[in-house]
Amino acid sequence: MSRSQAFENWSRQYRCMPNRVHYPTQTEAVVQVVQSAAQRGARIRVFGVGHSPSDIAMSDDELIVTTQLNRVLSVHRSTQTVTVQAGITLKELNQVLAREGLALPNLGSISAQTIGGAIATATHGTGLKYGVFSTWIQGMTLVTAVGEVLHLSEHENAHYFKAAQCSLGALGVVTELELKVCDAFDLEVFEQPNDLETVLANLPCRLEADHYRFWYLPHTDRVWEWSAMRKPPGRVQPPLAPVKRMQQWYQERLIGYHTLEFLLYLATFQPNWVPAINQWYTRQQFEVPRQSSSNSVAQFNFDCLFKQHVNEWCIPIQRTAEGILQIRDLIRDRGYQVHLPIEVRFVKGDHIWLSPCQGGDRCYIGVIAYLPYGKPVDYAAYFADYEQIMDNLAGRPHWAKRFDRDQTWLKERYPDWDDFQTVRAKLDPHHCFSNRYTDRVLGALQP
């Protein structure tokens, strides 16, 4: 245990200074931490790597940091299941699985976050055959507010299991997870520019791909499409020749990263430069179609560039065109100077109580506002209007992203809300596992 250590999230938007910090290495140590905190009447949260752009993991009381709760406990090749501690990052897990000829069924843009944090917030990738990461869970170990160790699955404590699959860390500390994985696979990826109307008109055909997403590029009325098909692993690609590596660095790092950040920094003084910057960047990065084939991790993950505000909601998939067209018109009509891109992804529906995809297939639309060199930008009005559009289209916010709705509003969007709250009252009646985030989105403990 340590004291008075500052913690920040990745974008440095949120910071906390907990009174006590714990670094357990196994479930038994977590039990001791929780029991001790309960005796002191302390509130405690779990902190992984702080990747969420929200304050979900922040606490000025006590933190359990899971960086040492990160082992792979077992790999079963025959059943394609693995048991891991919840603090392992997706990157670490990907490496272990690759050595066994296995892989996670889907990934998002990055693999820096812990598996515990990813399932607690129903993190997702893209592809209508694949659900949020929480759907991988076969079983889990949960330490409750009194230090009881529960094993949860569809067949054991099943009522708690549906709540714990996406719990926002509000039911207890998840220490171990049994996950369904799959054989390792490559992705053959096709990328191309297009216009928005063409993409939307042909969207049903596009979604027949194993994985599909597109980026709308504000102030250009252009789209960059990304479509991938799964195939058996091929031979390892040879290293790039020195000249090719230099060309790649020039295009991806010098132009795609450093020059863009510098230009967006200048635009903080002259916001009306943003449309021209977007148009220049589109010509540099999104004009020439590309095709590539490599392992799934390399193809799913990509560089998300520098610090940024992020807001992402999902809407029923049949309302995809309404959503993106209304956002396009909002930017034009209100004169917002909007950073690119707006990412659009597609996820299979599920039956998890607090999953944003509960009840049917969903389209996720994510907006960003970069912080070049950490400098704040004016984004509040744009994000508020974006949220109103998503709200009007029966949307639900991504739990790990930044959003402004509270528990009164959220309750109306989740049919199983009361069931979740019943489980929370049973497992954590005194809200030991709460903070300002959970007070806001799930409700605070009433006197």
Image (spheres, rainbow, N blue to C red):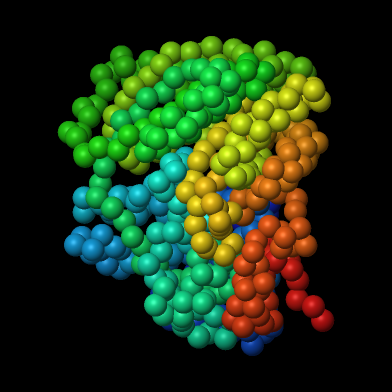
In this orientation, which residue lies closer to the viewer: 252 or 190? 190
In this orientation, which residue lies closer to the viewer: 205 or 378? 205
Residue at figure coordinates x 54%, y 24% from the top left: 201
- In the rendered image, residue 149, in percent from the top left (x then y), is placed at 46, 83
In this orientation, which residue lies closer to the viewer: 251 or 411? 411
On screen, 50 above or below 381? below
Residue at figure coordinates x 64%, y 87% from the top left: 39
Q: Is residue 185 left or right of residue 276?
A: left
Q: Is residue 152 left or right of residue 271?
A: left
On screen, 407 above or below 102? below
Q: Which corner quadrant of the image does residue 387 belong to? A: top right
On screen, 7 above or below 380? below
Quadrant where the C terminus sits is bottom right
- In the rendered image, residue 203, in percent from the top left (x then y), is placed at 50, 29
Q: Is residue 152 visible?
A: yes
Q: Which corner quadrant of the image does residue 427 belong to? A: bottom right
Quadrant where the N terminus sits is bottom right
Residue at figure coordinates x 43%, y 41% from the top left: 127
Q: Which corner quadrant of the image does residue 241 belong to? A: top left
Residue at figure coordinates x 69%, y 43% from the top left: 393
- In the rendered image, residue 216, in percent from the top left (x then y), is placed at 58, 26
- In the rendered image, residue 161, in percent from the top left (x then y), is placed at 48, 73
Q: Is residue 110 visible?
A: no
Q: Total label count?
A: 0
